[in-house]
Amino acid sequence: MNEAISLLSNYDESSLDAAFSTLAEEVRSETASLADVEAFRLRWLGRKQGRLKLVSEAWLKSAPADARKPLGMRFNQLKQQIEAALTDAETAPPALAAKAGIDITLPGSVRAPGNEHPLLKTMNEVVAVFHRLGYSTALGPQVESDFYNFEALNFPPNHPARDTQDTLVLAGQQTKASRDRLLMRTHTSPVQIRTMIAEAPPIRIVVPGKVHRNDAADATHSPVFHQVEGLCVDTNITFSDLKGTLDHAMKALFGSAVKTRFFPSFFPFTEPSADVQISCIFCAGKGCRKCKQSGWIELLGCGMVDPAVFASVDQQRVAQGKERAYDAAKISGFAFGMGVERIAMIQHGISDIGQFYSGDMRFLEQFA
Ligand code: PHE
C-alpha cells in the first residue's frame, strides 16, 4: 500500500522544488535495484492508488491558480522520469549479469570427465575375473516373485528370510497365490533359477546386480546393496572345483598372497554350504582390529547346488514344454554369492558403507 502524500503548506518555487526532489530521489533509489518492474509501475502509475495519482490529488487540486503552472511542470518531469526508468528496465539486458559485472569473455567452468563409481569398478573387476574363466554375464529383474526369490531356491514357506522384517514386499499382493507375490529381490540367486529354466547345462554365469533388504542403514548395512552371484553346472562338478575357482578369484581380487578357508554354513539352496574367509589383508593374518584379531575376514557364501533346486527347475521346464535337463544323478554344480560393497570396503579400507551413496565428490574423486 502506498504511503499517503502529505499536503503542501507552501506553493512557492523552492517549496515545490524540495517536495518534488524528495519524490525524484525515491524514484531513483527504487530504480537502482529494480527487481519487480510491474510492482514499480503500479506503485507510481497505478490509476487509483499510484503515487502520481495521490500527488495530483493532494497537491494539484488545492493549488492556488498561480502555482498550477510551476507545479504542473514539475509533475510532468517526475512522470517522465518514471516512464524513462520503466523503458530502461524493459529494454536493459538481464539485470543480473549487468549488475554483477560478469565478464562473458572469461572461459567457462570446466566439467570434470565422468569416472566409474567405486562400486561399479569393483563389481566389474569381480565379473572380469570370472569372464576370464569362461563365465558369461546374466541379469534378472529387481522386482521378483516369491517363486524365484524363495520357493524354487528351497526356502520353506515359513523361513525367516521371507518375513517382511527382512524382505521388502510390494503392496497389494495379498490376493495372489503366495508364489506369485512380488517383492524386491533379497539376493541375486533367483537368476540361477531363471537361467536354468531357460537353458540346459553346461552353465557358467556371473550375475551382478542390486538387491534389497528391510535393513536399517548403519556403517556396514544398507537396505539397497549389490551382489555378484555365480553358478556353474556341468557333469562332474565337485566341491574341489568350487574351492579352486573361489581361491583363484580371491587371489585375483586381493593379491596372490591371500589364503582362503571354507567354513561349514547353511543356505537352503546349497548342500553342503560354506562361508569363504580370506586371510586378513590388513595384517596378513596376524590379527588386528579389522579382522577382530582372528586373522580372517568372512567374504562370501557358497555351496553345491541342492538337488531340490534342480528338481524344481526341471518341474518348471516340463511345465513350459521343455525337456528335463537337471537330473541330479547326472549333473552337479556349485553357486556362490558375494557382496560388492563389502569387497570394495576391504579393497579400499572404507569403514562407512554410506560413503558409496553420499555423492560426495571429495570421496568419489579418490577413485578417479
Ligand atoms: N544368496 C546368498 C545370500 O544372499 C549367497 C549365496 C549365493 C550362497 C549362492 C550360496 C550360493 O546370502
Image (tube, rainbow, N blue to C red):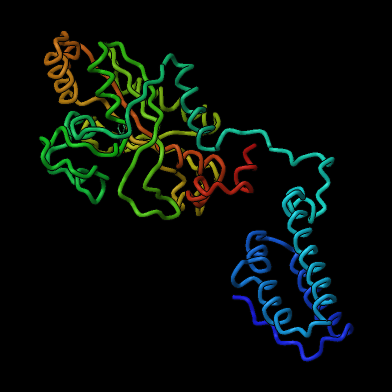
Q: Could you say where residue 301 lies in the image, as x and y percent from the top left?
A: 33, 35
Q: Which residue lies furthest to the bottom in this view?
A: 9
Which quarter of the figure is the N terminus placed in? bottom right
Q: Which residue lies furthest to the front in this view?
A: 65
The picture quadrant where one finds residue 61 is: bottom right
The picture quadrant where one finds residue 219 is: bottom left
Which quarter of the figure is the C terminus placed in? top right
Left or right of residue 15, residue 305 in this image = left
Name the residue nearer the viewer: 243 or 228.
Answer: 228
Q: Could you say where residue 263 lies in the image, as x and y percent from the top left?
A: 32, 38
Q: Residue at x 51, y 51 (%)?
A: 351
Q: If the picture is divided into quarters, which one holds ligand 1?
A: top left
Q: Which residue is drawn at 34% across and 37% down?
A: 275
Q: Residue at x 41, y 22 (%)?
A: 245
The picture quadrant where one finds residue 137 is: top left
Q: Could you say where residue 233 lies in the image, as x and y percent from the top left?
A: 29, 16
Q: Can residue 271 be seen in this view?
A: no
In the picture shown, does residue 133 fall above or below 280?
A: above
Left or right of residue 301, residue 148 in this image = left
Q: Could you say where residue 193 lies in the image, as x and y percent from the top left?
A: 24, 24
In the picture shown, does residue 51 fall above or below 86?
A: below
Q: Can residue 9 be seen in this view?
A: yes
Left or right of residue 177, residue 300 in this image = right
Count the numbered circles shown. 0
Q: Residue furthest right?
A: 14
Name the residue nearer the viewer: 245 or 50.
Answer: 50
Q: Which residue is drawn at 63% across and 59% down?
A: 38
